[in-house]
Amino acid sequence: MKDRSRPGPAAAVFELHPSRLLGLIQSVRMVRTVLLFSSVASTNDAAMKYHGGEGALFVAEEQTAGRGRKGRSWRSTVGKSLVVSLVLEPGRAREGLTVLVSLGIARALEGIVPGIGIKWPNDLLVGQRKICGILAEARGDRVVIGIGCNVNEDSRDFPPEIAGGATSLRIASGSYRDRGKILAMIVESFGEVYVRWREEGFAPFRDEVERRLVFTGENVTIDTGSELVGGILRGVTGEGFLRLGTGTEERIFVSGDVTVRREGREPDTGARQG
Ligand code: BTN
């Protein structure tokens, strides 16, 4: 039987070659322009400076200063990761947009790795390990959605400080994947939920997000940047905000970083990359 865990001749087609990438992306309705960089500081920074409109997709083989949330850095592996940013002009209240991106990606990857979890609002997990992170940044009417996805990494590609909390599609599924196809699947899937969200808001996606939400019913701490609040994670609202039971009341959070507290263990974000 063929050993699909080893990079073979087929691995060459997994390069982000411009004409091949364009061929894969051109049928994705959401995308109007593709800007492909062999190396860039950060696709989010490049997209923030771009003056074109919605649907510009920035793709890089390498980021020299990739950024995660809360000022953290984002490490990616040349030739193996996907690092992309998509420019949006949502033209309405933006509630739930980051969680919506998480849902679009989880749906896209479901056929490869079933049961991908959403760690509210911006991390995708396989079990306790992070496979994908999202950085949404707004300026004026524009929102840049940055996506970092581990695709063909082996466990030794991750630096020791994140190796215990990171995984890739290759590790989780046992096979190397075509990054161009994965990218097309992600953007197509996001486009579908985005069109509906623009018309109807987040509410139609609430149940599906709650089914995928990790740490529901568990004791968590949310760090909002200005306070740390502990409680039981109850789910999300119809706007995509986080519901936390704190004793007798329920509190709603628009943004924040969630960590879970489990008996006898250190608080665990379940997501150390970034
Ligand atoms: C996080 O988990 O903290 C978010 C990580 C987002 C990383 C992506 S990679 C493409 C885009 N460019 C960046 O500099 N960051 C985002």
Image (spheres, grey):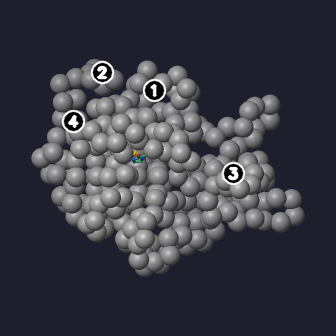
Give how far across and how far down residue 7 sits, in percent: 27, 23
Most foreground residue, 2 or 122 = 122
Q: Quadrant of the N terminus?
A: top left
Say which label, 1 or 4, has the lower sequence index: 4
Residue located beneath label 2 in the image: 6
From the viewer's perspective, tell me whether residue 254 is left or right of residue 201.
Answer: right
Say which mark, if any, is on residue 158: 1
- Residue 263 lies, with reference to residue 237, above or below; the image says above
Label 1 SS: loop
Q: Residue furthest right?
A: 248
Q: How far apart are labels 3 and 4 at the CA level?
A: 39 Å
Q: Is residue 126 visible?
A: no
Residue located beneath label 3 in the image: 223
Which residue type does callout 4 highlight? Glu
Q: How far apart are labels 2 and 1 at the CA level?
A: 18 Å
Q: How far apart are labels 1 and 4 at the CA level?
A: 20 Å
Residue at image coords 32%, 52%: 46
Which residue type does callout 2 highlight? Arg
Of circles 3 and 2, which is in front?
Answer: 3
Q: Is residue 12 visible?
A: yes
Q: Give neighbour class at mark 2: few <14, some 14-19, many 20+ (Cα, 10 Å).
A: few
Residue located beneath label 4 in the image: 15
Say which label, 3 or 4, has the lower sequence index: 4
Say which label, 2 or 4, has the lower sequence index: 2
Q: Give neighbour class at mark 3: few <14, some 14-19, many 20+ (Cα, 10 Å).
A: some
Q: Give neighbour class at mark 4: few <14, some 14-19, many 20+ (Cα, 10 Å).
A: some
Label 3 SS: strand
Residue at image coords 22%, 64%: 32
Give how far across and how far down residue 27 sits, in percent: 19, 60
